[in-house]
Image (cartoon, rainbow, N blue to C red):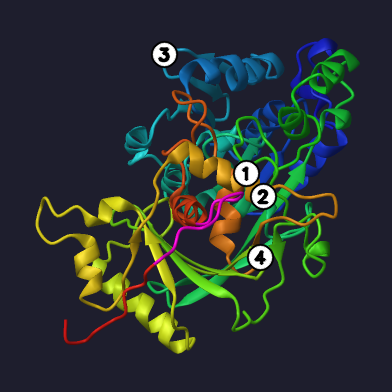
């Protein structure tokens, strides 16, 4: 297809079938890969090259998380396949300068603060390798740099590649994998208040496994076969519900089993029977999201997460709602549902009154009461593992209604803390998980629940 790009036969770029699909994509945003050895990096580099050669004067920006990763991957692949007759690499500008005035700019963005280094650039094509190593904040900011003068006659695009896993696993999965079947173009409508009209944008996921790449030897396949289960399934099979460092790798979301409740944690919603005991769990957040979860527990002790209220505006950023407003929202939700006798548990820190009226006191003024939850982190994680475990018949101790989309999105994306290997990484989106922990610790598996005395709202207090 593009064999002329190599200066010698050994360096010719002959795209695989999956790489060819990637090059032919017409989507606005594409994620390529999903497993190791699928030819992701070479495809990114050559797609940027093709676009540079197709239109004089364009700038393609190629990102990796760190400088060393950038040099060892995107720069290496570009210098391997692009002949000096067409473009020359400058280590001073970290760019591949083409003879027609176009350029491939190699850049890194190690942390969220680094994104402001690109505040003034004009990006005609955004290419990100190992996208799950980036936060959504960085991704969204870099996309704001996508623009092109009309004279160029081009539409700026986003092309990314990644394996499962990493700090951005959850948002990348939600953005590219979850919308629907792979290969298909999935549409989203974007309305512009400034222009007064909207248009459709398309997103596409093109999976590529090592078995799709004929240039990779079988030794590499056997190397992946020998990895631990979660790592093997992520890198060899491209599974997005399993990755290295995943805390709750037993999590299963199987739509075909939603109605049978067997070997799935996600189920079809149903009316909570009146005999179910109802509980509410709360994790406060202001700059970070707050989380409110409602659970129903049947006579066998099986818990059902049937409602969530997640106070996040995206990118792990909170809604900055005062505690009193959150309490009003909780009361409104429960009153509209006709719910009474809901027992609440919350992070003990909301009773901290060292800087004035505590969060708990502010919420009590609105008629919403909580009992201090047990904040033992390791014990709480153990309870989650025990609840998620399936018995021989495929039943578990915790089910989640399919309408609780944020819990379903964030729980399987939690990773272990690199400095506390037994605990969840608190830099991740762990707010809904924390709220669930407070509830689970109130009803520990294998122990008799403690007696709870619920305070009743008294408007005269």
Q: Nearer the viewer, residue 40 or 156?
A: 40
Q: Are marks 2 and 1 in contact (CB under 8 Å)?
A: yes
Q: How crowded is the residue under tag 2: few (<14 C-alpha within 10 Å), some, or many (20+)? A: many
Q: CA distance from mark 2 to mark 3?
A: 53 Å
18 lies left or right of 240: right
174 lies left or right of 417: right
Which mark's residue is nearer the viewer, 4 or 3?
Answer: 4
Q: CA distance from mark 4 to mark 2?
A: 34 Å
Which mark's residue is nearer the viewer, 4 or 2?
Answer: 2
The quadrant of the picture occupied by the C terminus is bottom left
- Residues shaded magenta: 443-452
**Which residue has dot 1 on it?**
385
The quadrant of the picture occupied by the N terminus is top right
Which mark's residue is nearer the viewer, 2 or 3?
Answer: 2
Write the residue at 25% across / 70% down.
Answer: 363
Write the residue at 54% across / 51% down.
Answer: 444
Write the residue at 66% across / 65% down.
Answer: 187
**Which residue has dot 2 on it?**
388
């Amino acid at each position: 297809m593009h064999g002329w790009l190599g200066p010698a036969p050994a360096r010719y770029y002959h795209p695989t079938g999956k790489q060819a699909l990637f090059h032919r994509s017409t989507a606005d945003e594409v994620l390529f890969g999903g497993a190791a050895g699928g030819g992701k990096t070479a495809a990114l580099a050559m797609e940027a090259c093709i676009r540079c050669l197709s239109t004089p004067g364009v700038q393609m920006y190629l990102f990796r998380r760190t400088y060393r990763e950038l040099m060892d991957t995107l720069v290496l692949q570009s210098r391997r396949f692009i002949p000096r007759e067409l473009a020359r690499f400058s280590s001073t500008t970290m760019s591949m300068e083409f003879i027609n005035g176009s350029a491939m700019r190699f850049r890194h963005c190690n942390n969220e603060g680094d994104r402001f280094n690109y505040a003034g650039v004009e990006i005609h094509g955004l290419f990100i390798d190992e996208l799950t190593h980036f936060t959504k904040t960085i991704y969204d900011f870099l996309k704001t740099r996508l623009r092109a003068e009309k004279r160029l006659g081009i539409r700026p695009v986003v092309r990314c590649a990644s394996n499962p896993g990493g700090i951005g696993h959850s948002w990348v999965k939600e953005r590219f994998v979850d919308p629907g079947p792979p290969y298909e173009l999935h549409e989203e409508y974007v309305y512009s208040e400034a222009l007064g009209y909207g248009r459709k944008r398309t997103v596409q996921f093109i999976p590529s496994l090592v078995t799709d790449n004929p240039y990779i030897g079988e030794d590499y396949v056997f190397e992946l076969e020998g990895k631990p289960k979660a790592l093997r399934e992520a890198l060899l099979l491209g599974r997005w519900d399993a990755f290295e460092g995943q805390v709750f790798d037993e999590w299963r979301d199987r739509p075909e089993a939603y109605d049978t409740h067997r070997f799935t944690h996600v189920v079809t919603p149903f009316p909570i029977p009146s005999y179910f005991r109802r509980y509410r769990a709360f994790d406060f957040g202001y700059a970070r999201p707050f989380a409110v979860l409602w659970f129903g527990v049947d006579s066998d002790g099986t818990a059902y997460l049937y409602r969530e209220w997640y106070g996040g505006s995206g990118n792990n950023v909170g809604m900055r709602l005062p505690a009193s407003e959150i309490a009003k929202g909780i009361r409104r939700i429960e009153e509209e549902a006709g719910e009474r006798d809901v027992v609440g548990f919350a992070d003990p820190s909301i009773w901290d009154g060292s800087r004035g009226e505590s969060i708990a006191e502010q919420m009590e003024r609105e008629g919403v009461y909580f009992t201090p939850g047990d904040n033992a982190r390791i014990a709480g994680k153990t309870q989650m593992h025990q609840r998620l475990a399936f018995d021989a018949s495929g039943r578990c101790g915790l089910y989640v209604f399919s309408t609780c989309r944020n819990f379903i999105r964030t729980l399987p994306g939690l990773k272990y803390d690199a400095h506390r290997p037994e605990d969840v990484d608190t830099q991740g989106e762990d707010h809904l998980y924390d709220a669930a922990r407070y509830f689970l610790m109130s009803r520990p598996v294998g122990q008799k629940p403690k007696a709870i005395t619920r305070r009743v709202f008294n408007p005269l207090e």
